[in-house]
Image (cartoon, rainbow, N blue to C red):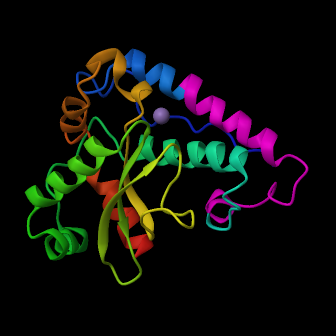
């Protein structure tokens, strides 16, 4: 049972002007597709072949670079497309909002911590908001296609929000201006989906 490239819930140009259509098209149809195909090749004929991706990553031998890089790439991008939407829900409410206020004091402080994690991740990687059992949230970043489900990375828990800061995610439109891309990302976050993931992961 091979993994399949998930379809987006919106058109490639739906997140403009924040994320441009050409970047979205290449990112999804080339990069994410590549991770998906390479993951399938890496697990074909192994005991990982019929495992869910969360279980593959949670029990991963980190020395298995093909599965680490491509399994991470498959999972991370699948999450990324889903936590963005042209119909960005602007106001946070409910339990996730309370948990963010508990951890950071204010939404602005959270935004600033998340943006800093994204801006200071050296080279390629991801910034994350994760939830731990019990509902505590945490911000962190990981290099390359690593993510918090893997052991031995800088944070744990379940990722509920992730931002791709590889240059392929923003360079066409933003060139070296990663902070502008990070700011723009906040205009397309699908908070309803993040809240759903928070409730499932807490
Ligand atoms: Mn990417």
Task: Measuring from the top left, give residue 36's x and y in whole percent.
Answer: 67, 37
So how many labels did they put on this image?
Answer: 0
Name the outermost residue toward the bottom: 134
**Residue 48 sits above or below residue 81 on the image:** below
**Residue 37 sits above or below residue 74 on the image:** above
Q: Is residue 18 magenta?
A: no
Task: Measuring from the top left, give residue 147's x and y in whole percent.
Answer: 50, 55
Asked whether, in this view, residue 169 is left or right of residue 66, the answer is left
Asked whether, in this view, residue 50 is left or right of residue 163, the answer is right
Q: Which residue is more in the foreground, 164 or 91?
A: 164
**Residue 181 sits above or below residue 106 on the image:** above
Q: Which residue is more in the foreground, 101 or 109?
A: 109
- Quarter of the image that includes the C terminus: bottom left
**Residue 163 sits above or below residue 46 on the image:** above
Asked whether, in this view, residue 43 is left or right of residue 17, the answer is right
Q: Going 68% across and 68% down the picture, which residue do you hit?
A: 59
Q: Is residue 40 magenta?
A: yes
Quadrant housing residue 124:
top left
Q: Going 21% across and 42% down the picture, which residue do you hit?
A: 186
Task: Measuring from the top left, give residue 40's x and y in whole percent.
Answer: 77, 41
- Please state the extent of the stretch shown in magenta in the rendering: 29-57
Name the outermost residue toward the right: 45
Q: Going 68% across and 62% down the picture, which residue do you hit?
A: 60
Q: Going 66% across and 65% down the picture, which residue do you hit?
A: 55
Secondary structure mostly seen in the magenta stretch: helix
């Amino acid at each position: 049972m091979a993994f399949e490239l998930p379809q987006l819930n919106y058109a490639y140009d739906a997140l403009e002007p924040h994320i441009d259509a050409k970047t979205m098209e290449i990112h999804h149809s080339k990069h994410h597709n590549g991770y998906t195909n390479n993951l399938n090749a890496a697990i074909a004929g192994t005991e990982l072949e019929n495992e869910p991706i969360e279980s593959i990553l949670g029990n991963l031998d980190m020395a298995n670079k093909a599965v680490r890089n491509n399994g991470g790439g498959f999972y991370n991008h699948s999450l990324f497309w889903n936590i963005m939407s042209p119909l960005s829900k602007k106001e946070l409410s409910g339990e996730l909002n309370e948990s963010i206020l508990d951890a950071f004091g204010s939404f602005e402080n959270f935004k600033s911590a998340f943006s800093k994690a994204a801006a200071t991740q050296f080279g390629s990687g991801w910034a994350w908001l994760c939830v731990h059992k019990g509902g505590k949230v945490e911000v962190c970043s990981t290099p390359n296609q690593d993510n918090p489900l893997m052991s031995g990375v800088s944070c744990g828990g379940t990722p509920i929000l992730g931002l791709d800061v590889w240059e392929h995610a923003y360079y066409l439109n933003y060139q070296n201006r990663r902070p502008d891309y990070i700011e723009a990302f906040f205009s397309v976050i699908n908070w309803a989906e993040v809240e759903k993931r928070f409730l499932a992961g807490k």
